[in-house]
């Protein structure tokens, strides 16, 4: 039984790890915090694998876990990281524009409180409905709407969305879930 679970989880990881890590980067701003958040969510997903039931539900479970860990501030803290003197090059042709946009999006999201950031990531990156977001966050639909409105207002007041229309503001090249 465990061997089948391990194989199914390994297949899930191979197929969806990058998507989960992108979500964690959007939620945290990137870096080691994103990797820690993704790993903690994946560990919890693995432990709950027998309850998840379907492979299709595993990514939603991991995403929900990440959002709840972030909003509740209960991420696992690990202080054993050793900084490297020099980072390896991982660039590829055309990478500069995509990377610049992705970094800018993450920076903008970091200006928001965690709960508002989570609502925007779930709504505009994962295309979840208000009802689905409310289920993930464990709050009412009205709370989701007010958090989204406050987040968008803060971004507009800060001049971040001034040059973009509401429809264009969330078509971020470089951070899509369709890589």
Image (cartoon, helix red, strand yellow):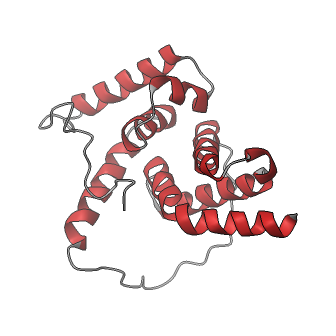
Single out the residue that lies furthest toward the right. Answer: 1
Q: Specify whether 152 is left or right of 4.
A: left
Q: Position of residue 62 (x, y in %)?
A: 62, 49
Single out the residue that lies furthest toward the left. Answer: 163
Which sits in the foreground, 115 or 45?
Answer: 45
Residue 154 occupies which quadrant of the picture?
top left
Which sits in the foreground, 138 or 115?
Answer: 138
Residue for point 45% across, 57% down: 22
Query: From the viewer's perspective, is residue 84 above or below residue 111?
Result: below
Q: Position of residue 61 (x, y in %)?
A: 64, 45
Q: Position of residue 31 (x, y in %)?
A: 48, 63
Which sits in the foreground, 169 or 77?
Answer: 169
Residue for point 39% across, 54% down: 177
In the picture, the quarter occupied by the N terminus is bottom right
Q: Specify whether 96 is left or right of 20.
A: left
Residue for point 27% across, 40% down: 170
Residue for point 63% across, 26% down: 138
In the picture, the quarter occupied by the C terminus is bottom left
Single out the residue that lies furthest toward the top. Answer: 142
Query: From the viewer's perspective, is residue 9 above or below residue 65?
Result: below
Q: Position of residue 46 (x, y in %)?
A: 74, 57
Query: From the viewer's perspective, is residue 168 above or below residue 151?
Result: below
Query: From the viewer's perspective, is residue 81 above or below residue 137?
Result: below
């Amino acid at each position: 039984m465990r061997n089948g679970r391990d194989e199914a989880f390994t297949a899930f990881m191979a197929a969806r790890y990058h998507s989960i890590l992108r979500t964690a980067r959007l939620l945290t701003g990137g870096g080691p915090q994103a990797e820690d958040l993704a790993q903690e969510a994946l560990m919890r997903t693995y432990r709950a694998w027998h309850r998840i039931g379907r492979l299709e539900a595993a990514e939603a479970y991991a995403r929900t876990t990440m959002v709840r860990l972030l909003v509740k501030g209960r991420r696992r803290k690990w202080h054993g990281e050793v900084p490297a003197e020099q980072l390896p090059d991982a660039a590829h042709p055309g990478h500069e524009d995509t990377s610049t946009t992705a970094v800018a999006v993450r920076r903008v999201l970091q200006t928001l409180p965690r709960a508002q950031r989570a609502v925007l990531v779930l709504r505009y990156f994962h295309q979840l409905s208000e009802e689905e977001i409310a289920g993930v966050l464990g709050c009412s639909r009205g709370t989701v709407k007010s958090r989204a409105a406050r987040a968008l207002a803060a971004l507009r007041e800060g001049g971040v969305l001034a040059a973009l229309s509401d429809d264009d503001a969330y078509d971020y090249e470089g951070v899509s879930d369709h890589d």
